[in-house]
Image (cartoon, rainbow, N blue to C red):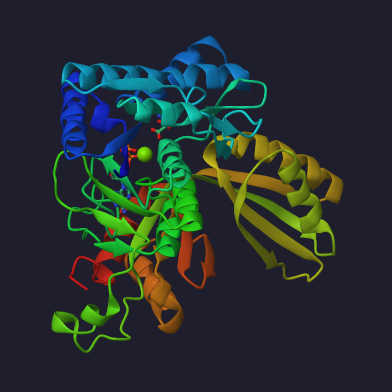
Amino acid sequence: MAIIIHKYGGTSVGTPEKIKNVARRIKKVIDAGNEVVVVVSAMGHTTDELIDLMHKVTDSPDPREYDMLVSTGEQVSAALLAMALQSAGCPAVSLTGGQAGVVTEDIYRKARIKEIKLDRIKKELKGGRVVVITGFQGIDSKGDIITIGRGGSDTSAVAMAAALKADVCDIYTDVDGVYTTDPRIVPEARKLKHISYEEMLELASLGAQVLHPRSVEVASLYGIVIHLRSSLKDDEGTYIGKAPRLTSFARGKEAGKMEKKEAVRGIALDENIAKIGILHVPDKPGTAAKLFGALAKGKINVDMIVQSIHSQGTLADMAFTVERTDMKRAVEVAKKIAAELKAEGVVSDPDVSKVSLVGVGMVSQPGTASKMFETLASEKINIQMITTSEIKISCVIKAEQGKQAVRALHKAFGLEKVA
Ligand code: ADP
Ligand code: ASP
Ligand code: MG
Protein backbone atom coordinates (compact mmCIF):
# COMPACT_ATOMS: atom_id res chain seq x y z
CA MET A 1 0.00 0.00 0.00
CA ALA A 2 1.47 3.34 -1.04
CA ILE A 3 1.27 6.54 1.00
CA ILE A 4 0.17 9.40 -1.22
CA ILE A 5 0.73 13.04 -0.20
CA HIS A 6 -1.58 15.71 -1.58
CA LYS A 7 -1.39 19.44 -0.89
CA TYR A 8 -4.27 21.79 -1.71
CA GLY A 9 -3.69 25.56 -1.87
CA GLY A 10 -6.04 28.37 -0.81
CA THR A 11 -8.06 28.65 -4.03
CA SER A 12 -8.48 24.86 -4.24
CA VAL A 13 -10.26 24.84 -0.84
CA GLY A 14 -11.73 28.35 -1.24
CA THR A 15 -15.45 27.40 -1.05
CA PRO A 16 -17.53 24.56 0.47
CA GLU A 17 -18.10 23.22 -3.09
CA LYS A 18 -14.35 23.16 -3.74
CA ILE A 19 -13.75 21.38 -0.44
CA LYS A 20 -16.28 18.72 -1.47
CA ASN A 21 -14.51 18.44 -4.83
CA VAL A 22 -11.21 17.81 -3.02
CA ALA A 23 -12.92 15.17 -0.86
CA ARG A 24 -14.15 13.38 -4.02
CA ARG A 25 -10.61 13.41 -5.47
CA ILE A 26 -9.14 11.94 -2.29
CA LYS A 27 -11.86 9.28 -2.09
CA LYS A 28 -10.84 8.03 -5.55
CA VAL A 29 -7.24 7.61 -4.38
CA ILE A 30 -8.41 5.79 -1.24
CA ASP A 31 -10.74 3.54 -3.24
CA ALA A 32 -7.75 2.58 -5.41
CA GLY A 33 -6.17 1.10 -2.26
CA ASN A 34 -3.80 3.83 -1.09
CA GLU A 35 -3.22 5.62 2.21
CA VAL A 36 -3.50 9.40 1.95
CA VAL A 37 -2.04 12.29 3.92
CA VAL A 38 -3.39 15.71 2.89
CA VAL A 39 -1.88 19.09 3.69
CA VAL A 40 -4.15 22.12 3.31
CA SER A 41 -3.79 25.89 3.16
CA ALA A 42 -6.33 28.33 4.55
CA MET A 43 -9.47 28.94 2.46
CA GLY A 44 -9.06 31.60 -0.25
CA HIS A 45 -7.62 34.84 1.10
CA THR A 46 -8.22 33.96 4.77
CA THR A 47 -4.60 34.55 5.83
CA ASP A 48 -4.58 38.04 4.24
CA GLU A 49 -7.89 38.82 5.93
CA LEU A 50 -6.53 37.74 9.31
CA ILE A 51 -3.52 40.02 8.81
CA ASP A 52 -5.81 42.95 7.87
CA LEU A 53 -7.80 42.29 11.02
CA MET A 54 -4.61 42.33 13.06
CA HIS A 55 -3.60 45.73 11.64
CA LYS A 56 -6.94 47.13 12.81
CA VAL A 57 -5.93 46.22 16.36
CA THR A 58 -2.21 47.01 16.41
CA ASP A 59 0.68 48.45 14.35
CA SER A 60 3.29 46.39 16.13
CA PRO A 61 1.98 42.84 16.57
CA ASP A 62 3.64 40.58 19.06
CA PRO A 63 5.22 37.77 16.95
CA ARG A 64 3.81 35.02 19.20
CA GLU A 65 0.27 36.34 18.89
CA TYR A 66 0.77 36.85 15.12
CA ASP A 67 1.43 33.11 14.77
CA MET A 68 -1.47 32.27 17.05
CA LEU A 69 -3.76 34.33 14.81
CA VAL A 70 -2.61 33.53 11.26
CA SER A 71 -2.35 29.79 11.88
CA THR A 72 -6.11 29.55 12.51
CA GLY A 73 -7.05 29.72 8.81
CA GLU A 74 -5.57 26.29 8.12
CA GLN A 75 -7.46 24.80 11.06
CA VAL A 76 -10.77 25.81 9.47
CA SER A 77 -10.02 24.22 6.09
CA ALA A 78 -8.52 21.05 7.63
CA ALA A 79 -11.57 20.43 9.84
CA LEU A 80 -14.01 21.15 6.98
CA LEU A 81 -12.15 18.81 4.62
CA ALA A 82 -12.13 16.03 7.24
CA MET A 83 -15.92 16.51 7.64
CA ALA A 84 -16.45 16.48 3.85
CA LEU A 85 -14.46 13.24 3.62
CA GLN A 86 -16.48 11.66 6.42
CA SER A 87 -19.72 12.69 4.65
CA ALA A 88 -18.41 11.04 1.47
CA GLY A 89 -18.00 7.80 3.42
CA CYS A 90 -14.26 8.14 3.92
CA PRO A 91 -13.00 8.00 7.54
CA ALA A 92 -10.77 11.03 8.17
CA VAL A 93 -9.20 13.05 10.97
CA SER A 94 -7.80 16.59 10.95
CA LEU A 95 -4.62 17.42 12.88
CA THR A 96 -2.90 20.72 13.65
CA GLY A 97 0.83 20.92 12.90
CA GLY A 98 1.56 20.27 16.57
CA GLN A 99 -0.79 17.27 16.77
CA ALA A 100 0.81 15.89 13.60
CA GLY A 101 4.27 16.08 15.20
CA VAL A 102 5.68 18.96 13.11
CA VAL A 103 8.46 20.44 15.26
CA THR A 104 9.98 23.77 14.22
CA GLU A 105 12.77 26.07 15.35
CA ASP A 106 11.91 28.46 18.19
CA ILE A 107 11.42 31.41 15.80
CA TYR A 108 8.03 33.01 15.27
CA ARG A 109 6.71 33.86 11.79
CA LYS A 110 9.29 32.13 9.58
CA ALA A 111 10.70 29.10 11.37
CA ARG A 112 12.18 26.10 9.61
CA ILE A 113 10.86 22.61 10.22
CA LYS A 114 13.29 20.63 12.40
CA GLU A 115 11.60 17.22 12.39
CA ILE A 116 8.29 15.43 12.02
CA LYS A 117 7.45 12.89 14.72
CA LEU A 118 5.28 10.40 12.87
CA ASP A 119 3.68 8.41 15.72
CA ARG A 120 0.25 10.07 15.59
CA ILE A 121 0.06 10.14 11.78
CA LYS A 122 1.04 6.46 11.56
CA LYS A 123 -1.54 5.55 14.20
CA GLU A 124 -4.31 7.34 12.30
CA LEU A 125 -3.29 5.76 8.98
CA LYS A 126 -3.25 2.35 10.62
CA GLY A 127 -6.80 3.02 11.82
CA GLY A 128 -7.83 3.47 8.18
CA ARG A 129 -8.29 7.24 8.32
CA VAL A 130 -7.24 9.92 5.84
CA VAL A 131 -5.02 12.34 7.76
CA VAL A 132 -5.70 16.00 6.99
CA ILE A 133 -2.93 18.26 8.31
CA THR A 134 -2.84 22.05 8.60
CA GLY A 135 -0.04 23.43 6.43
CA PHE A 136 2.09 26.47 7.28
CA GLN A 137 2.54 25.59 10.97
CA GLY A 138 4.19 23.47 13.63
CA ILE A 139 5.12 23.78 17.29
CA ASP A 140 8.37 24.84 18.93
CA SER A 141 10.16 23.44 21.97
CA LYS A 142 7.89 25.46 24.29
CA GLY A 143 4.76 24.03 22.65
CA ASP A 144 3.87 27.37 21.02
CA ILE A 145 2.24 27.43 17.58
CA ILE A 146 4.78 28.62 15.03
CA THR A 147 4.25 29.55 11.36
CA ILE A 148 6.89 28.88 8.73
CA GLY A 149 6.54 31.88 6.37
CA ARG A 150 3.88 33.06 3.89
CA GLY A 151 3.11 30.44 1.25
CA GLY A 152 4.73 27.82 3.50
CA SER A 153 2.13 25.05 3.14
CA ASP A 154 4.04 23.80 0.08
CA THR A 155 7.04 23.25 2.36
CA SER A 156 4.86 21.54 5.00
CA ALA A 157 3.68 19.08 2.32
CA VAL A 158 7.11 18.30 0.88
CA ALA A 159 8.56 17.88 4.39
CA MET A 160 5.70 15.46 5.13
CA ALA A 161 6.54 13.51 1.93
CA ALA A 162 10.19 13.35 3.04
CA ALA A 163 9.28 12.13 6.54
CA LEU A 164 6.89 9.48 5.18
CA LYS A 165 9.46 8.45 2.53
CA ALA A 166 7.10 9.10 -0.37
CA ASP A 167 8.71 9.50 -3.80
CA VAL A 168 6.27 12.09 -5.08
CA CYS A 169 4.42 15.04 -3.53
CA ASP A 170 1.33 16.13 -5.47
CA ILE A 171 0.74 19.88 -5.08
CA TYR A 172 -2.70 20.91 -6.33
CA THR A 173 -3.24 24.57 -7.18
CA ASP A 174 -5.20 26.93 -9.43
CA VAL A 175 -2.85 26.53 -12.44
CA ASP A 176 -2.19 23.24 -14.21
CA GLY A 177 1.59 23.47 -13.97
CA VAL A 178 4.67 25.65 -13.91
CA TYR A 179 4.67 28.00 -16.90
CA THR A 180 7.49 29.91 -18.59
CA THR A 181 6.17 32.89 -16.63
CA ASP A 182 3.07 33.82 -14.60
CA PRO A 183 0.17 33.11 -17.01
CA ARG A 184 -1.77 35.93 -15.36
CA ILE A 185 0.82 38.34 -16.84
CA VAL A 186 1.46 36.56 -20.15
CA PRO A 187 -1.53 34.49 -21.35
CA GLU A 188 0.70 32.93 -24.10
CA ALA A 189 3.08 31.49 -21.46
CA ARG A 190 3.90 27.83 -22.09
CA LYS A 191 3.44 25.01 -19.60
CA LEU A 192 6.66 23.14 -18.83
CA LYS A 193 6.49 19.34 -18.61
CA HIS A 194 9.55 19.23 -16.45
CA ILE A 195 11.84 21.66 -14.66
CA SER A 196 15.01 21.00 -12.66
CA TYR A 197 15.22 21.72 -8.92
CA GLU A 198 17.89 24.32 -9.65
CA GLU A 199 15.76 26.29 -12.10
CA MET A 200 12.59 25.99 -10.02
CA LEU A 201 14.41 27.13 -6.90
CA GLU A 202 15.67 30.22 -8.73
CA LEU A 203 12.24 31.03 -10.22
CA ALA A 204 10.51 30.60 -6.84
CA SER A 205 13.15 32.61 -4.97
CA LEU A 206 13.01 35.36 -7.59
CA GLY A 207 9.30 35.94 -7.13
CA ALA A 208 7.32 33.24 -9.03
CA GLN A 209 4.78 32.62 -6.31
CA VAL A 210 3.67 29.24 -7.67
CA LEU A 211 5.86 27.34 -5.14
CA HIS A 212 7.39 28.25 -1.78
CA PRO A 213 11.19 28.25 -2.43
CA ARG A 214 11.91 26.16 0.66
CA SER A 215 9.65 23.37 -0.63
CA VAL A 216 11.96 23.00 -3.63
CA GLU A 217 14.99 23.01 -1.33
CA VAL A 218 13.53 20.20 0.80
CA ALA A 219 12.48 18.24 -2.32
CA SER A 220 15.99 18.37 -3.76
CA LEU A 221 17.55 17.45 -0.42
CA TYR A 222 15.42 14.28 -0.11
CA GLY A 223 15.04 13.49 -3.83
CA ILE A 224 11.27 13.99 -3.84
CA VAL A 225 9.61 14.77 -7.15
CA ILE A 226 7.03 17.56 -6.86
CA HIS A 227 4.11 17.12 -9.24
CA LEU A 228 2.49 20.56 -9.49
CA ARG A 229 -0.98 20.25 -11.00
CA SER A 230 -4.54 21.58 -11.16
CA SER A 231 -7.12 20.67 -8.52
CA LEU A 232 -9.84 20.94 -11.19
CA LYS A 233 -8.39 18.67 -13.90
CA ASP A 234 -6.93 15.17 -13.99
CA ASP A 235 -4.21 16.07 -16.52
CA GLU A 236 -0.53 15.75 -15.72
CA GLY A 237 1.04 18.97 -14.52
CA THR A 238 4.74 19.82 -14.22
CA TYR A 239 7.28 17.47 -12.68
CA ILE A 240 9.90 19.27 -10.65
CA GLY A 241 13.17 17.44 -10.26
CA LYS A 242 12.51 14.44 -12.48
CA ALA A 243 14.40 14.69 -15.73
CA PRO A 244 12.94 13.18 -18.91
CA ARG A 245 14.78 10.09 -20.15
CA LEU A 246 17.49 11.38 -22.43
CA THR A 247 17.60 8.32 -24.72
CA SER A 248 14.10 8.92 -26.02
CA PHE A 249 14.65 12.68 -25.84
CA ALA A 250 17.48 12.48 -28.37
CA ARG A 251 15.30 10.55 -30.80
CA GLY A 252 11.92 11.29 -32.34
CA LYS A 253 10.93 14.89 -32.76
CA GLU A 254 13.77 15.98 -30.47
CA ALA A 255 16.36 14.40 -32.86
CA GLY A 256 19.36 16.60 -33.51
CA LYS A 257 18.89 18.57 -30.30
CA MET A 258 21.12 16.45 -28.12
CA GLU A 259 23.16 19.30 -26.67
CA LYS A 260 20.75 22.04 -27.50
CA LYS A 261 19.15 23.59 -24.47
CA GLU A 262 17.15 26.79 -24.31
CA ALA A 263 19.17 29.50 -22.59
CA VAL A 264 16.10 30.87 -20.83
CA ARG A 265 13.53 28.53 -19.26
CA GLY A 266 11.46 31.00 -17.30
CA ILE A 267 10.92 34.61 -16.26
CA ALA A 268 10.05 35.77 -12.75
CA LEU A 269 8.80 39.12 -11.50
CA ASP A 270 9.23 40.20 -7.88
CA GLU A 271 6.96 43.12 -7.06
CA ASN A 272 7.70 43.04 -3.34
CA ILE A 273 11.08 44.77 -3.20
CA ALA A 274 12.46 48.21 -2.31
CA LYS A 275 15.79 49.85 -3.17
CA ILE A 276 18.01 51.69 -0.69
CA GLY A 277 21.11 53.70 -1.55
CA ILE A 278 23.89 55.19 0.60
CA LEU A 279 25.63 58.02 -1.18
CA HIS A 280 29.31 58.94 -1.01
CA VAL A 281 30.57 56.47 1.57
CA PRO A 282 34.35 56.41 2.13
CA ASP A 283 35.81 53.75 -0.21
CA LYS A 284 37.89 51.85 2.34
CA PRO A 285 38.06 48.36 3.92
CA GLY A 286 35.29 47.59 6.42
CA THR A 287 32.55 49.87 5.06
CA ALA A 288 30.39 47.12 3.55
CA ALA A 289 31.02 44.86 6.56
CA LYS A 290 29.75 47.56 8.90
CA LEU A 291 26.59 48.33 6.93
CA PHE A 292 25.55 44.77 6.08
CA GLY A 293 26.60 43.53 9.52
CA ALA A 294 24.17 46.01 11.08
CA LEU A 295 21.39 44.95 8.69
CA ALA A 296 22.00 41.27 9.45
CA LYS A 297 21.87 42.02 13.17
CA GLY A 298 18.46 43.60 12.61
CA LYS A 299 17.39 40.35 10.84
CA ILE A 300 16.87 42.23 7.56
CA ASN A 301 17.43 40.08 4.50
CA VAL A 302 19.42 41.88 1.83
CA ASP A 303 19.14 40.67 -1.76
CA MET A 304 20.98 42.55 -4.55
CA ILE A 305 24.03 44.64 -3.65
CA VAL A 306 25.77 47.03 -6.03
CA GLN A 307 28.74 49.25 -5.21
CA SER A 308 29.91 51.84 -7.69
CA ILE A 309 33.12 53.84 -7.56
CA HIS A 310 32.77 57.58 -7.46
CA SER A 311 34.81 59.89 -9.67
CA GLN A 312 36.92 61.24 -6.78
CA GLY A 313 38.23 57.72 -6.16
CA THR A 314 37.95 57.93 -2.38
CA LEU A 315 34.17 57.66 -2.26
CA ALA A 316 31.65 55.03 -3.37
CA ASP A 317 27.87 54.73 -3.70
CA MET A 318 26.19 51.60 -2.38
CA ALA A 319 22.76 50.32 -3.29
CA PHE A 320 20.89 47.25 -2.13
CA THR A 321 17.41 45.78 -2.18
CA VAL A 322 15.26 44.39 0.63
CA GLU A 323 11.70 43.05 0.92
CA ARG A 324 9.37 46.04 0.73
CA THR A 325 7.93 45.34 4.18
CA ASP A 326 11.48 45.69 5.62
CA MET A 327 12.23 49.05 3.92
CA LYS A 328 11.43 51.33 6.86
CA ARG A 329 13.59 49.35 9.27
CA ALA A 330 16.42 49.04 6.72
CA VAL A 331 16.44 52.82 6.12
CA GLU A 332 16.69 53.45 9.87
CA VAL A 333 19.71 51.13 10.12
CA ALA A 334 21.31 52.60 6.97
CA LYS A 335 20.89 56.18 8.28
CA LYS A 336 22.59 55.30 11.54
CA ILE A 337 25.55 53.67 9.79
CA ALA A 338 25.71 56.47 7.18
CA ALA A 339 26.09 59.02 10.00
CA GLU A 340 28.86 56.95 11.61
CA LEU A 341 30.68 56.61 8.27
CA LYS A 342 30.15 60.30 7.45
CA ALA A 343 28.39 59.40 4.17
CA GLU A 344 26.43 62.05 2.32
CA GLY A 345 22.99 60.52 2.86
CA VAL A 346 20.50 57.70 2.38
CA VAL A 347 17.88 57.45 -0.36
CA SER A 348 15.10 54.86 -0.70
CA ASP A 349 12.59 53.87 -3.37
CA PRO A 350 9.68 51.45 -2.83
CA ASP A 351 8.49 51.82 -6.45
CA VAL A 352 10.78 49.21 -7.98
CA SER A 353 10.41 45.61 -9.16
CA LYS A 354 12.88 42.92 -10.12
CA VAL A 355 12.58 41.02 -13.38
CA SER A 356 14.74 37.90 -13.80
CA LEU A 357 15.58 35.40 -16.53
CA VAL A 358 16.37 31.85 -15.36
CA GLY A 359 17.91 28.89 -17.21
CA VAL A 360 20.73 26.41 -16.67
CA GLY A 361 21.53 26.64 -20.41
CA MET A 362 22.51 30.30 -20.04
CA VAL A 363 26.03 29.52 -18.94
CA SER A 364 26.96 27.92 -22.27
CA GLN A 365 25.16 30.41 -24.50
CA PRO A 366 26.60 33.92 -24.63
CA GLY A 367 24.42 36.89 -25.52
CA THR A 368 21.53 36.34 -23.13
CA ALA A 369 22.35 39.38 -20.98
CA SER A 370 22.85 41.70 -23.94
CA LYS A 371 19.56 40.53 -25.49
CA MET A 372 17.80 41.22 -22.19
CA PHE A 373 19.26 44.74 -21.97
CA GLU A 374 18.44 45.49 -25.64
CA THR A 375 14.85 44.31 -25.15
CA LEU A 376 14.38 46.52 -22.08
CA ALA A 377 15.97 49.47 -23.89
CA SER A 378 13.64 49.10 -26.88
CA GLU A 379 10.72 49.30 -24.40
CA LYS A 380 12.26 52.46 -22.88
CA ILE A 381 12.69 50.69 -19.57
CA ASN A 382 15.62 52.01 -17.54
CA ILE A 383 17.72 49.42 -15.67
CA GLN A 384 18.62 50.59 -12.17
CA MET A 385 20.57 47.57 -10.91
CA ILE A 386 21.85 44.33 -12.46
CA THR A 387 23.03 41.06 -10.90
CA THR A 388 23.96 37.82 -12.61
CA SER A 389 24.84 34.25 -11.72
CA GLU A 390 25.52 31.22 -13.93
CA ILE A 391 21.80 30.52 -14.25
CA LYS A 392 20.06 33.87 -13.83
CA ILE A 393 20.11 37.56 -14.74
CA SER A 394 18.09 40.04 -12.68
CA CYS A 395 17.35 43.72 -13.34
CA VAL A 396 15.73 46.21 -10.99
CA ILE A 397 13.39 48.51 -12.88
CA LYS A 398 10.50 50.91 -12.17
CA ALA A 399 7.60 49.00 -10.57
CA GLU A 400 5.02 50.29 -13.05
CA GLN A 401 7.02 48.80 -15.95
CA GLY A 402 7.41 45.31 -14.42
CA LYS A 403 4.64 43.50 -16.30
CA GLN A 404 5.53 45.27 -19.56
CA ALA A 405 9.13 44.03 -19.13
CA VAL A 406 7.99 40.43 -18.57
CA ARG A 407 5.78 40.50 -21.68
CA ALA A 408 8.54 41.98 -23.88
CA LEU A 409 11.19 39.53 -22.63
CA HIS A 410 8.87 36.53 -22.99
CA LYS A 411 8.35 37.48 -26.64
CA ALA A 412 11.99 38.37 -27.35
CA PHE A 413 13.22 34.99 -26.10
CA GLY A 414 10.43 33.12 -27.93
CA LEU A 415 9.27 31.36 -24.78
CA GLU A 416 5.73 30.83 -26.04
CA LYS A 417 7.06 28.45 -28.72
CA VAL A 418 7.45 24.73 -28.10
CA ALA A 419 11.10 24.07 -27.32
P1 ADP B 1 -1.91 28.21 -3.89
O1 ADP B 1 -2.94 29.02 -3.17
O2 ADP B 1 -2.46 26.97 -4.50
O3 ADP B 1 -0.68 27.95 -3.05
P2 ADP B 1 -0.57 30.39 -5.26
O4 ADP B 1 -1.47 31.56 -5.52
O5 ADP B 1 0.38 30.48 -4.11
O6 ADP B 1 -1.48 29.08 -5.14
O7 ADP B 1 0.26 30.05 -6.58
C1 ADP B 1 -0.37 29.87 -7.81
C2 ADP B 1 -0.25 31.13 -8.67
O8 ADP B 1 1.12 31.37 -8.99
C3 ADP B 1 -0.92 31.04 -10.03
O9 ADP B 1 -2.27 31.40 -9.99
C4 ADP B 1 -0.08 31.98 -10.91
O10 ADP B 1 -0.73 33.18 -11.18
C5 ADP B 1 1.18 32.26 -10.09
N1 ADP B 1 2.42 32.04 -10.84
C6 ADP B 1 3.50 32.85 -10.80
N2 ADP B 1 4.47 32.42 -11.61
C7 ADP B 1 4.02 31.27 -12.18
C8 ADP B 1 4.58 30.34 -13.11
N3 ADP B 1 5.82 30.49 -13.62
N4 ADP B 1 3.84 29.26 -13.47
C9 ADP B 1 2.59 29.08 -12.98
N5 ADP B 1 2.00 29.94 -12.09
C10 ADP B 1 2.69 31.02 -11.70
N1 ASP C 1 -2.12 30.32 4.27
C1 ASP C 1 -0.72 30.66 4.27
C2 ASP C 1 -0.48 31.91 3.43
O1 ASP C 1 -1.41 32.44 2.85
C3 ASP C 1 0.15 29.52 3.83
C4 ASP C 1 -0.07 29.02 2.41
O2 ASP C 1 -1.10 29.31 1.79
O3 ASP C 1 0.79 28.30 1.91
O4 ASP C 1 0.62 32.38 3.39
MG1 MG D 1 1.05 29.13 -2.61
- Foreground residue among 335 and 2: 2
Residue 396 placement, left or right of 242: right
- Foreground residue among 364 and 393: 364
Q: Residue at x 72, y 44 (%)?
A: 295
> Looking at the image, can residue 98 be seen?
yes
- Residue 260: % across, % down: 30, 84
- Residue 129: % across, % down: 31, 25
> Looking at the image, can residue 135 be seen?
no
Q: Is 280 rendered above or below residue 3? A: below
- Residue 362: % across, % down: 42, 76
Residue 394 placement, left or right of 17: right
| Quarter holding ligand 1 | top left
- Residue positioned most to the bottom: 256
- Residue 28: % across, % down: 15, 36
Q: Residue at x 67, y 40 (%)?
A: 331
- Foreground residue among 380 and 120: 120
Q: Quadrant of the N terminus?
A: top left
